Amino acid sequence: MSVKQQQAKEMALEAAGVDAPLYAPRAKIYPQSVKGKFRRLKWAILIATLGVYYFLPFIRWDRGPNAPSQAVLVDIEHGRFYFFFIEIWPQEVYYLTGLLIIAAMTLFLMNAVAGRIWCGYLCPQTVWTDLFLAVERLIEGDRRERMQKAGQGWTLESVAQAALKHWAWLMIAWWTGGAWVLYFADAPTLVYNLATFQGPVTAYIWIAILTFTTYFFAGFMREQVCTYMCPWPRIQAALTDEHALNITYRYDRGEPRGSLKKSALLREAGAKAGDCVDCNQCVVVCPTGVDIREGLQIDCIQCGLCIDACDTVMTKVGRPTGLIAYDTDINVKLRESGQPPLPAKIVRPRTILYAAIIASIGAIMSFALATRADSGLSVMHDRNPLFVRLADGSIRNAYTVRLANKQAEDRRFELRVKDHSPGQVEAVGSAAGASGWPILTVGPDRTLETRVLVKRPSAGGAARSDIVFELRDLLTGETVETRDHFLMP
Amino acid sequence: MSLAPHDKNMVDAHTGVSTTGHEWDGIRELNTPLPRWWLWMLYATIVWAFGYMIVYPAVPLVASYTTGVFGWSSRAAVTQELAALGAQRAPMVTALASATLPDIEKNPTLLAFARAQGKAAFGDNCAGCHGAGGGGAKGYPNLVDDEWIWGGTLDDISQTLTYGIRSTDPKARVGNMPAFGTDGLLKPAEISQVADYVRSLSGLPLDGKPDLKAGARIFEENCAACHGAEGKGMQELGAPNLTDQIWLYGSDKPTIVEGLNKGRGAVMPHWGERLDAGTIKALAVYVHTLGGGR
């Protein structure tokens, strides 16, 4: 049973007094091409975002002989993330937390200013669906041709075009998956290995997964992802307010809608006639198939294409553009009551709050990055035994000390303990330097774990007191400190 | 899938959407149909579940269970992973087994590996008596401090580990603290005097005014042979140093008297039979680097 037959059956059932089913068939959407400023903006964003996605892994960044030379690299095997001049270790995952907070707040801010900017212009689902639609249009023709072909059933031409379309889709999807894995290994090497069938199995599996999801979501699921699978429309519905700019049909100007001729007659008779000529262009260009004239709705991803469509028609019929435009709920209410609209209030408490959070997290992260030490020192007191009495009666505590060298070359460090003499401190297996303090060498971009023993005379010590370890780079003098405690019986 | 025939009451007046007919206190649930593919996904997951049951062990039978077409089992998977881990570690294990003990401590990579392996083996085999961190307990020596009853060099530790102390191994370390009291070698008064003298060796406070000279004479005649004239002990015989601050059983007088009366002779098993040479080496290095190694 075709979708149309199914729909007809359900409508008949409903007309006969039987309630609508709990499941509805999907109505196929054939979005029509459109020209205009929002379409141009979307092309520009599509080219920019896909360009970054596909080519970023190939950008090189020289980090010396002991580190990868890829600008952006998630090195899972060695637990490193490289982003141009930044190198993040797993224990610095708070940078990721900061980025996620900034990302969330940016979504909130975009939403508070102009609704679903993310959904309409930036979301991968939107961008790839747009690309797939463009390919579909190029091969099978625009809305009218595609609908015709769908009605005609299979012909030699339609089969050939469909095959070509799916091949093109699969190629794009395959490149999408291929680019994904390049972020996790040296891109040129991996491309060579993949092409000569020597790549790691994981890479092939991930390419297959992303090829499938891209092909399936952008080729087939499309608006269903936004309407039924994505949580963001629900969240954004809770975040929007009366000050947010949303794509809005101007009822006051458009209604009552009617054909040009009918409206002209109405105007001649002195009655009110709307500008909407009911040409349905806003509906046919919509990638989610909604009618914007029914108001703001959850299916609408706010991509702006209906604005382009309506403006084109308005220009043709000689009426002012902007019948569909970004507008606020406040203005909708004002126009309803015949009052003039107000300029959108972008600067208001919630946008200031979001911007302030973004700025402060950004500032904290920049400060942390700028002052981030290239060496690390973490100290862990032994849990068992907490202390040891030595033959001469003095008390010794043992610590597991981990040194980190975040530079790409060998470094020698001196480990000191504040308010102690070198004789009281020993790093197991490491020789002491001229100063008497233990000297430790840590390999490039490595950590080194060692056991450090600290001794104090038994007399007059508190049961628990502070102890400060100090790690000093012998070459640069860079010093990091870590506090722990010393326990006595 | 259709519900009961609806009447006018089943259409929500405000939205014009039909309701499901479910009503709670006058509130009716709108019927917002899910897309049909959602339903297909439910069926697909059911089909998938059957496939899963065929491929993997799933159905319990009377005395066994269906093993699945690939014969996969979690035990086999673990065995495989352990084998892979063993293969990955093999070069280091070989290097450890062939290296001499001092060489291991000089090579940072080998040392780190030996300490990691030693720590695991220590937890499995030694922690029961010596404590998870080697802190020891009454009668079980502390391995972290700097006092060694049988010697604290790598070779000493390795020998103790391999052959044990007073164990059934013919090469075990042997040396006994005699039971001076129960065997009638010393009278109770003499035991009390020598106990006071021993406490005085490490500067412990004494009760009353004990006859230290008598204690010293008894010590010289009975104890000095093993513990040395000055009480500094003798590692060849496992006789502890009595002048330092470390006491295996305790430094109070009743404990010392008890030791004099009944003797001491705790047993350390010989691990050479149970553990391979590499593990013994790893353990020796681990214990040696706990902090007291000589």
Image (spheres, coloured by chain):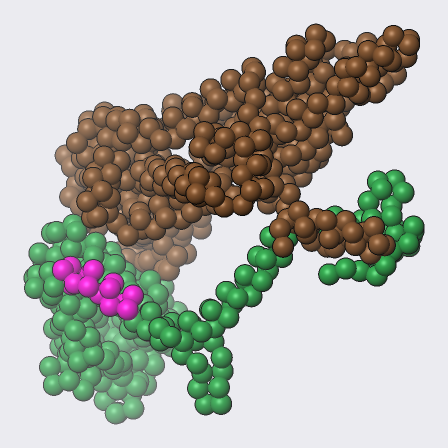
Chain colours: A brown, B green
Q: Which residues are magenta?
A: B80-93
Q: Where is B25 relative to B257, above or below? A: above
Specify the quadrant of the image occupied by residue B220. Answer: bottom left
Specify the quadrant of the image occupied by residue B124. Answer: bottom left
Q: Residue B37: where, in percent of width, then height?
A: 60, 52
Answer yes or no: is residue A309 visible: yes
Query: What kind of secondary structure does the magenta stretch mostly adopt?
Result: helix
- Out of B111 and A45, give the one closest to the viewer: A45
Rendered-image quadrant of the C terminus of chain A: bottom left
Residue occupying image coordinates x 47% and y 69%: B51
- Out of A233 and A410, give the one closest to the viewer: A233
Q: Where is A326 relative to B126, above or below? A: above
Q: How many marks?
A: 0
Taking the magenta stretch, the answer to whether it contains residue A278 is no
- Out of B37 and B137, give the one closest to the viewer: B37
Residue occupying image coordinates x 80% and y 21%: A257
**Position of A387 compared to B90: left or right?**
right
Answer yes or no: is residue A350 visible: no
**Position of B22 compared to A380: left or right?**
right
Q: Where is A33 relative to A195, above or below? A: above
Specify the quadrant of the image occupied by residue A237. Answer: top right
Q: Residue A128: where, in percent of width, then height?
A: 47, 34
Residue occupying image coordinates x 36% and y 54%: A382
**Position of A34 compared to B214: left or right?**
right
**Position of A225 compared to B76: left or right?**
right
Residue occupying image coordinates x 24% and y 64%: B84
